[in-house]
Image (tube, rainbow, N blue to C red):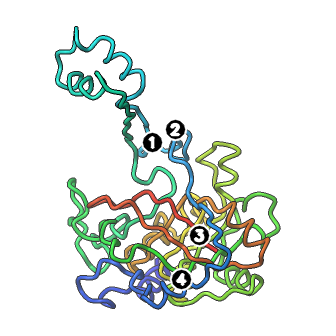
Amino acid sequence: MKDFRRVADDVRNWGRWGDDDELGTLNLITDDKVAEAASLVKRGRVISLGGDFGSNGPQGAFKFRINPIHVMTVDGGDAETLVKYAPEWARKSVAQELSSFFVDNPFRFNDDMITMSLQAATQWDALSHVYYEDKLYNGFPADSVTSFGAYRCGIEKVDGKGIVSRGVLLDVVAHRGEEVFCEPGRPITPAELDDIAAKQGVRIGRGDIVVVHTGWWTRFLSTGDGHEAGSGLHWTCASWLHDHEVAAVASDNLMVEDPDPANGVEGTFLPMHMICLRDMGLMLGEYWDLTGLAADCAADGVYEFQLIAPPLKVVGAVGAPVSPIAIK
């Protein structure tokens, strides 16, 4: 914990952008940075970085989160049935209202709804997601998050930034020569991140969003095992992200950081989450599908791109789905 507290104190951004700030390191994304990101588009190549939100998603392995439950509320069968039977039997307001759409005209429609954990698949962690010692980012009290949602640092607070910036892919899979994914037992260190950037010929600059390819999502698509661990960032990478003034970090694995307690801090769980979200004010993206992006970057040797990744603006949410895209 001594090392943990030293790093937390060193990277803490409380008050850096004012006492009321709820954006954290997203403040590093300036107008000039957004313009720089747009200038990276050369080929018009759009690459999706989002996974599917469905019943076979990764959260099926965890009891406190559920995979999306998708149901139809209106479909073609309803239309046919209501047109055929509603005049005789419809007594309830819903059936009456629907039948009025369908009777005596050709108009038809389908409608649906979804029930899901907001962090069920590709997503951002809001700054209110993780805290310790009763404090959120910027010193806001932990009890400002209630059963009604996060009054402070909710995911909707990032709307002004939209999360558009220069993205940089660091391909750990390729660097290590792994066939599919980085197996557990070898956390990704700050020195390795530097080596990867140097090998790829890419720099990490102020306001960038770093995207780390570990191959976990590709592995998950083949096995369906959401519990399977893989390599992630060592918790000391928080200092590396701070030193490079990174705006946010995302990965294709389930926690961004390495989940092995042996590579963490004794007496804590997910120490990098604690430092990044609570102390630094740096958002984490999890479960991103980086397979196509990694292949494209390897093919053209260009590891920088315009990244567009606004979360779903759910008021008071501590995390939200995202369907990010890279444009090259």
The residue lying at 55 percent from left, 48 percent from top is 52
Disc 4, SS: loop
Quadrant (top left, top right, bottom left, bottom right) of the C terminus? bottom right
Among numbered discs 3 and 4, the one appearing first in the sequence: 4
State how far apart marks 3 and 4 are (Cα).
13 Å
* 50 left or right, relative to 179: left
Disc 2, SS: loop
Disc 3, SS: strand
* 191 left or right, relative to 165: right
State how far apart marks 2 and 1 are (Cα).
6 Å
Q: Which residue is mark 4?
A: 208
The residue lying at 50 percent from left, 52 percent from top is 121
State how far apart marks 4 and 2 are (Cα).
33 Å
The residue lying at 42 percent from left, 88 percent from top is 31
Kindly indicate whether the residue at mark 3 contacts the one at mark 2 (C-beta within 8 angstroms). Answer: no
Q: Which residue is mark 3?
A: 326
Any mark on residue 55, and which? 2
Among numbered discs 4 and 2, the one appearing first in the sequence: 2
Q: Quadrant of residue 10?
A: bottom left
Q: Is residue 17 positioned above or below 305 on the image?
A: below
Kindly indicate whether the residue at mark 1 contacts the one at mark 2 (C-beta within 8 angstroms). Answer: yes
Among numbered discs 4 and 1, the one appearing first in the sequence: 1
Among numbered discs 1 and 3, the one appearing first in the sequence: 1
The label nearer to you, 2 versus 3, is 3
Which kind of residue does numbered mark 2 sit on? Answer: Ser
